[in-house]
Image (cartoon, rainbow, N blue to C red):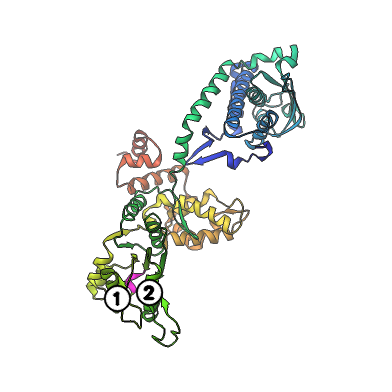
C-alpha cells in the first residue's frame, strides 16, 4: 500500500448509522461545537491545561490511526507508513497536509519531518470561537502527528508548531523530530503529552479490534440485497411485513411446491419469484418468465408449449416451448388471472401430470419444472364469477405469498429510495447523486399506488431534473407534491414546525405498530420512558 492510494470511501464503513474505520467506531462532529468546547476549556482550565487536554486528545487519535494502518495494510517501509498518517489528516478533514521534509535514518532512529497544514480545522475553531491566537493553537494536530509517528517508530517523537493560521499566518507549519534530536528545546513541551497511559490504551484497543474482526464481517453480511436488472426489491427489510415475506419465500424455496405470489401492480412479484428460484436447489437451471396477460391465447399457447413444424401457417420448423426451456428450473407465469378457460385446462394438466403437448403433436412430453404464478386479481372472486377454475386455483396456491403494498410498509420507503438513488447514479452517470433531506417527508407521506415501480420511476425523473446532482422536492413528479399538499398542514412538511413534524411522526409510528408502545419505541430509537413522556405531552389537559 502507498499513502497516496488511501481513499476515504474504502477506509470508512457505514452501516445503519455506525461509522467505523475497519472496526474502530467513528463519529462526525461539528468544528463549531468543538470551537465552543475549546472556548469553555480555556475559560475554565486556563490555556496550559486546555492545551494539555487537546494535545492528549490528538495524541491518542494519532496512535489509534497508526495502529489501524499497521493492522489493515502492508507497507513497503516505515517512511510510507508515516506518510499515511498525514494522508489520513487530509482524508479525515483535519487539514490539507503536505509533507515537505521527511528524513529518517533506520539505523540511528533519527527523524526530521516538516509539514504544512492548509485550512486547519482546528485553527478555524480557534479563530471563530476564541479569536486570534497569541501563539500557535493547533494542539490536536500537533498531538495527532506526535502520537502517530511515535506509534509507527515505537519511540518518542514530538512535533512543534512553528507557524499557525490562528496567529495570522497564511497556513500552519510544524516540525517533528525524535526526542534525542530535539535536545533541550522539547523539554518545555513535554508537559502537554504525558503519553504513557495513552500507549497502553491503544495497544489494548488494537487487540480488541483484532478479536472482533470476524464478528464485524458477519455483521456487515447481514445487509441483504437482491437486484434484478433495474428493478431492486430487497434492501435490508425494516418492516415486519417485508421480513415475513422474505422469511416465507426462503422456507418455500427448499421445496418444489407451486407458489402463488399476489399483490398490487409494481410491488415486485417477479423479483420475489426470482429470489425463490435463486435460493432453491434449481438455481443453476433456467428461470423463465412470461406475462400471460400480454399475449393473445393462440400466441401464448405456442410460447408455453411449443409446436411441431407444419402445425399452422408459418410454423416452418419445430419450436421448443417455455415449459421445456425451463427444464430443471422454474417457470414464472405472471398475470395468471388473465388467461382463458381453455388455457386454464392446459396449465392444469401440466401441474397434475407434469407433461405438455406441443401444438401439432399427439405424444405428450414430460417436463421437470417448478411453477410460480402471480396475479393482482382476487382469484377466489374470479372463481365465484365463473371465469377461473377452482381446481387450478388449488394447484397454483399450494403456498400463497402476498406482498404488501408500499404504503403499508412505510419503513421500507427511505432505504429503498436511497438504494434506488445509488443505482440511478450509476445508470445515469451522475456522480454523487443524492436525495436532499427536504424530499424525505414527501416520499414517506405519498401513498405510492404504483408501489416500488412508481417510486423508481419518480426518482429517475427527479434525478434527470436534478441540479448539481441533488434531488430536491420540486424535481419530484407534480402528483406526489400535489397529493401531499392536498392534505393541508398535516401533510405538507414545509408548513409545520419541528415539534409538529416530530409529534406527527410519533403518532404515525404508534398507529403503524397497532398501539404497541414497546415496538414504537424500538422503531423510533428511544426508550419506552421517553416515549411515554412524549405521548403524555401530546395529551390535552382537561
> Which label is found at residue 346?
1
Asked if one can make out residue 218 in the rendered structure from this viewpoint, the answer is: yes
Q: Determine the image quadrant of residue 472.
A: bottom right
Most foreground residue, 244 or 484: 244
The residue under label 2 is: 304
Q: Nearer the viewer, residue 528 or 464?
A: 464
Asked where in the image residue 341 lies, by quadrant, the reply is: bottom left
Local secondary structure at mark 1: helix
Q: Residue at x 58, y 18 (%)?
A: 44
Q: Which residues are magenta?
A: 334-338
In the image, is 424 to the left or to the right of 100?
left
Q: Is residue 456 magenta?
A: no
Of residues 199 and 491, which is closer to you in this image?
Answer: 199
The crowd level at tag 2 (other Cα within 10 Å; few <14, some 14-19, many 20+) is: many
Q: Residue 396 in the image: state x and y as whole percent.
A: 28, 66
Q: Position of residue 198 (x, y in %)?
A: 57, 19
Label 2's element?
helix
> What residue sits 46% from the left and 62% below the top?
454
Residue at 64%, 39% in the rendered image: 6
Residue at x 60%, y 34% (from the top left corner): 73
Measured in 3D between alpha carbons, the distance from the residue under mark 2 to the one under mark 1, in whole angstroms, is 10 Å
Amino acid at each position: 500500500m502507498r499513502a497516496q492510494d488511501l481513499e476515504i470511501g474504502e477506509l470508512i464503513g457505514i452501516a445503519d448509522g455506525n461509522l467505523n474505520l475497519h472496526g474502530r467506531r467513528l463519529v462526525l462532529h461539528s468544528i463549531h461545537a468543538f470551537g465552543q468546547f475549546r472556548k469553555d476549556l480555556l475559560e475554565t482550565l486556563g490555556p496550559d491545561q486546555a492545551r494539555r487536554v487537546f494535545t492528549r486528545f490528538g495524541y491518542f487519535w494519532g496512535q489509534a490511526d497508526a495502529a489501524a494502518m499497521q493492522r489493515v495494510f502492508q507497507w513497503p517501509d516505515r517512511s510510507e507508513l508515516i506518510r499515511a498518517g498525514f494522508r489520513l489528516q487530509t482524508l479525515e478533514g483535519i487539514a490539507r497536509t503536505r509533507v515537505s521534509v521527511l528524513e529518517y535514518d533506520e539505523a540511528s532512529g533519527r527523524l526530521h519531518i516538516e509539514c504544512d497544514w492548509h485550512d486547519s480545522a482546528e485553527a478555524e475553531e480557534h479563530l471563530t470561537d476564541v479569536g486570534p491566537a497569541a501563539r500557535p493553537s493547533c494542539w490536536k494536530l500537533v498531538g495527532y502527528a506526535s502520537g502517530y509517528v511515535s506509534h509507527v517508530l515505537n519511540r518518542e517523537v514530538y512535533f512543534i508548531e512553528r507557524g499557525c493560521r490562528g496567529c495570522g499566518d497564511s497556513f500552519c507549519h510544524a516540525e517533528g523530530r525524535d526526542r534525542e534530536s530535539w535536545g533541550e528545546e522539547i523539554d518545555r513541551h513535554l508537559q502537554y503529552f504525558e503519553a504513557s497511559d495513552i500507549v497502553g490504551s491503544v495497544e489494548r484497543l488494537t487487540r480488541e479490534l483484532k478479536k472482533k474482526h470476524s464478528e464485524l464481517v458477519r455483521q456487515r453480511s447481514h445487509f441483504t440485497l437482491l437486484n434484478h436488472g433495474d428493478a431492486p426489491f430487497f434492501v435490508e427489510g425494516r418492516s415486519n411485513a417485508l421480513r415475513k415475506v422474505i422469511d416465507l419465500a426462503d422456507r418455500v424455496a427448499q421445496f418444489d411446491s407451486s407458489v402463488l405470489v399476489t399483490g398490487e401492480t409494481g410491488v415486485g412479484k417477479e423479483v420475489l419469484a426470482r429470489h425463490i428460484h435463486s435460493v432453491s436447489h434449481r438455481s443453476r437451471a433456467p428461470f423463465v418468465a412470461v406475462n400471460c396477460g400480454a399475449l393473445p391465447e393462440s400466441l401464448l399457447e405456442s410460447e408455453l408449449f411449443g409446436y411441431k413444424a407444419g402445425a399452422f401457417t408459418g410454423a416452418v420448423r419445430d419450436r421448443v416451448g417455455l415449459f421445456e426451456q425451463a427444464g430443471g428450473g422454474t417457470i414464472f407465469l405472471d398475470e395468471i388471472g388473465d388467461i382463458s378457460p381453455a388455457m386454464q385446462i392446459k396449465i392444469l394438466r401440466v401441474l397434475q401430470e407434469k407433461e405438455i403437448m406441443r401444438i401439432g403433436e399427439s405424444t405428450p412430453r414430460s417436463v421437470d419444472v417448478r411453477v410460480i404464478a402471480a396475479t393482482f386479481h382476487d382469484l377466489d372472486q374470479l372463481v365465484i364469477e365463473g371465469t377461473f377454475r377452482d381446481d387450478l386455483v388449488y394447484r397454483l396456491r399450494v403456498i400463497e405469498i402476498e406482498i404488501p403494498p408500499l404504503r403499508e410498509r412505510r419503513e421500507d420507503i427511505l432505504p429503498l429510495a436511497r438504494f434506488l438513488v445509488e443505482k440511478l447514479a450509476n445508470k445515469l452517470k451522475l456522480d454523487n447523486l443524492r436525495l436532499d433531506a427536504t424530499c424525505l417527508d414527501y416520499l414517506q407521506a405519498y401513498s405510492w399506488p404504483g408501489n416500488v415501480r412508481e417510486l423508481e420511476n419518480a426518482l429517475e425523473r427527479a434525478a434527470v431534473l436534478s441540479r448539481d446532482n441533488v434531488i430536491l422536492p420540486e424535481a419530484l413528479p407534480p402528483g406526489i407534491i400535489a397529493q401531499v399538499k392536498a392534505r393541508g398542514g398535516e401533510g405538507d412538511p414545509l408548513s409545520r414546525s419541528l415539534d409538529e413534524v416530530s409529534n406527527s411522526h410519533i403518532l404515525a409510528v404508534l398507529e403503524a405498530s397497532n398501539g404497541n408502545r414497546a415496538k414504537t419505541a424500538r422503531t423510533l430509537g428511544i426508550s419506552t420512558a421517553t416515549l411515554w413522556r412524549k405521548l403524555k405531552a401530546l395529551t390535552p389537559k382537561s
